[in-house]
Image (cartoon, grey):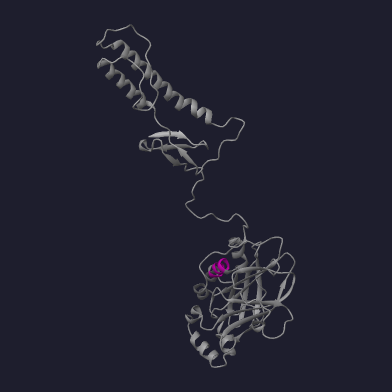
Amino acid sequence: MIEFKAECGHTIRAKDEDEGKVVRCSYCGKDAQVPQDEQDGGLDFLFAEVQRAGAQQVAAPASKRGRGRRHRSTVGTPRREGEFDWVDATKKMAFFAVLIIAAVLVWKVVVPALTQPSHATAPPPLPPVEESHPAVPSAPTYGLVHMSLDNQKGGLYVNSVPAGARVYLRKFGGKGDIWKDPSVDRSLRTERAIPLEPGKYELAVALVVNDSTLMNYPRYKEVRRAIESGGGAGVVEGFFLPDGSTETLPADMGDDMPKLIARKYPDVIINEKQWSALVALFVPDVSISELVSYIPQRTAFRFDPAHVKSELSYYDVPLPDQRFVMDVLERLGIAIYRKAPGDYQVFSINLTEGWLSHRELKGRGAVRAPGTGKKE
């Protein structure tokens, strides 16, 4: 095994057969040449000297077979032709032994000392430690944690269940159906943050009527048949869980376009350098324990669980249901809790601070989106 220092100061260990080759430093990534061991060349010369002395040759400089420089011996008494001088050979062996030891000391002690950084400079950084688990975002501590929001701007975070619904957005006061307005950007999709200037906006979120997730809902096929027959407005409104939209209705885009199911939010208020959230829930009107099975299984929001649990108890949410409400809040930032048919409580987590807000929803009126209410 050959050990040597790279330019960065990192110790490289190379195999003996890599002598003289170029290898890559695992720390800095730069190429480094494995040094050559010059001991073999010196021994080759020594053996050649002994062989030539035994063959009755006059000691004279010759080209080397191995690596290293030849050394002419000038010490010793003259010897007769044909006589092997053991004293001279021993002196040569001792001389090369000293050279070998000196070379090893230089390579092991002097070279590392010269390549080490001086005391006036900082030591090189340690190699990075590989994490065996994903790093937890350090900020923000609470609120929306799976997406960054610019603190110097304000806007709207839009999400939906199912994900990937189309978003139609325009300034308040537009004429006609928003999904037919040619000035509206039709490339926007849910689960994104949209920077907006302060003001009042109109929003619609829509899914195609044959969305694969919708088709897996119980009794949804009846809703689709009603829409495709030219009606279905009342059926659609009664099928989905209320989420703050003022209308849930079929949307006809034309003969060459599939029919849509749209939820309308006509009065979205954006304040200066503040972020609001809107979650369009295309899920059946079911209990909170059933709702969990229809939403994505991932953490998108964080909050103080002890505080939220205390608030849920304050609003008379039964203990068995509190775990489901908190689970939905972690995934969506908003949880619609059905106390009784037509009577709902809306719990939401603020986007940037993580505190809990609460609203009552009677029938199917509007619900303030997460992050826009006041801290309870």
Query: Where in the figure is residue 168, as x and y percent of width and height?
Result: 64, 78
* Vertical position of residue 369 compared to residue 122: above or below: below
* Vertical position of residue 151 compared to residue 84: above or below: below
Query: Where in the figure is residue 277, as x and y percent of width and height?
Result: 65, 70
Quarter location, residue 332: bottom right
Quarter location, residue 44: top left
Residue at 51% x, 42% y: name it. Answer: 28
Give the number of callouts.
Answer: 0
Is residue 126 covered in magenta?
no
Apparent side of residue 21 relative to residue 121 in the rendered image (left or right): left
Is residue 329 covered in magenta?
yes
Query: Where in the figure is residue 131, as x and y percent of width and height?
Result: 49, 50
Residue at 49% x, 86% y: name it. Answer: 221
**Residue at the top extreme?**
77
Query: Where in the figure is residue 116, as x and y percent of width and height?
Result: 54, 31
**Quarter of the figure with the C terminus:** bottom right
Between 242 and 68, the residue placed more toward the observer is: 68
Q: What span is colored magenta in the figure? A: 324-331
Q: Would residue 79 be seen by someone viewing this image from the given angle?
A: yes
**Dominant secondary structure (helix, strand or loop) of the stretch shown in magenta:** helix
Q: Would residue 314 be seen by someone viewing this image from the given angle?
A: no
**Quarter of the figure with the N terminus:** top left
* Vertical position of residue 1 compared to residue 256: above or below: above
Residue at 51% x, 83% y: name it. Answer: 210
* Vertical position of residue 184 compared to residue 192: above or below: below
Between 216 and 303, the residue placed more toward the observer is: 216
Quarter location, residue 100: top left
